[in-house]
Image (cartoon, grey):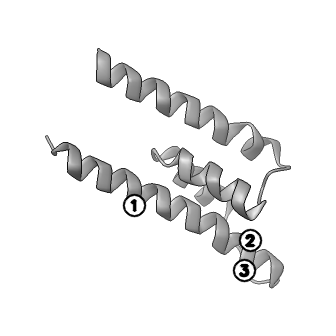
């Protein structure tokens, strides 16, 4: 079992990656370049990185009008919080 510090570093790295993916995709969209797929953005959000993804959506104002992101990423955040709570206190 990894120690708590390793888990914190892992979750921070995953969230930073999700945040950066949203920022890079927004940059690519403005420059009319090849984009990061929606599937990749959603998978990065689902890998315990919903806080970083949600922050990226808000900071970069990216994908906020698409329902699967507007409702899906916050739903993932609630699910991740619930799972974390359950694992902490079960």
The residue that appears at 82% across and 79% down in the rendered structure is 30
Rendered image: mark on residue 13: 1
Image location (x, y in percent) of residue 4: 21, 43
Q: What distance separates the C-alpha of mark 2 from that of mark 3?
A: 11 Å
The residue that appears at 65% across and 37% down in the rendered structure is 74
- Provide the secondary structure element on which disc 3 rests: loop
Q: Which residue is mark 3?
A: 34
Whether pointer 1 and pointer 2 mark residues with C-beta atoms closer than 8 Å, the reply is no
Image location (x, y in percent) of residue 2: 16, 45
Quadrant for the N terminus in the image: top left
Quarter of the figure with residue 36: bottom right
Quarter of the figure with residue 14: bottom left
- Provide the secondary structure element on which disc 1 rests: helix
Q: Nearer the viewer, residue 58 or 36?
A: 58
Structural crowding at the residue carrying mark 2, measured as other residues with C-alpha within 10 Å and reported as few (<14), some (14–19) or many (≥20): many
Quarter of the figure with residue 71: top right
Structural crowding at the residue carrying mark 3, measured as other residues with C-alpha within 10 Å and reported as few (<14), some (14–19) or many (≥20): few
Labels 3, 1: front one: 1
Whether pointer 3 and pointer 1 mark residues with C-beta atoms closer than 8 Å, the reply is no
Q: What distance separates the C-alpha of mark 1 from that of mark 2?
A: 20 Å
Q: Earlier in the sequence, mark 2 or mark 3?
A: 2
Labels 2, 3: front one: 2
Q: Which residue is mark 2?
A: 26
Left or right: where 47 falls relative to 32: left
Left or right: where 28 falls relative to 39: right
Q: What distance separates the C-alpha of mark 3 from that of mark 1?
A: 24 Å
Query: How many circles with numbers are drawn on the protein?
Result: 3
The residue that appears at 72% across and 54% down in the rendered structure is 58
């Amino acid at each position: 079992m990894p120690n708590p510090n390793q888990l914190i570093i892992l979750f921070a790295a995953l969230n930073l990656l999700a945040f950066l993916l949203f920022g890079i995709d927004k940059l690519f969209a403005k420059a009319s370049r090849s984009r990061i797929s929606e599937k990749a953005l959603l998978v990065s959000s689902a890998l315990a990185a919903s806080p970083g993804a949600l922050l990226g959506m808000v900071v970069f104002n990216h994908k906020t009008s698409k329902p699967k992101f507007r409702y899906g990423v916050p739903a993932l955040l609630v699910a991740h919080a619930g799972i974390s709570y359950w694992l902490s206190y079960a």
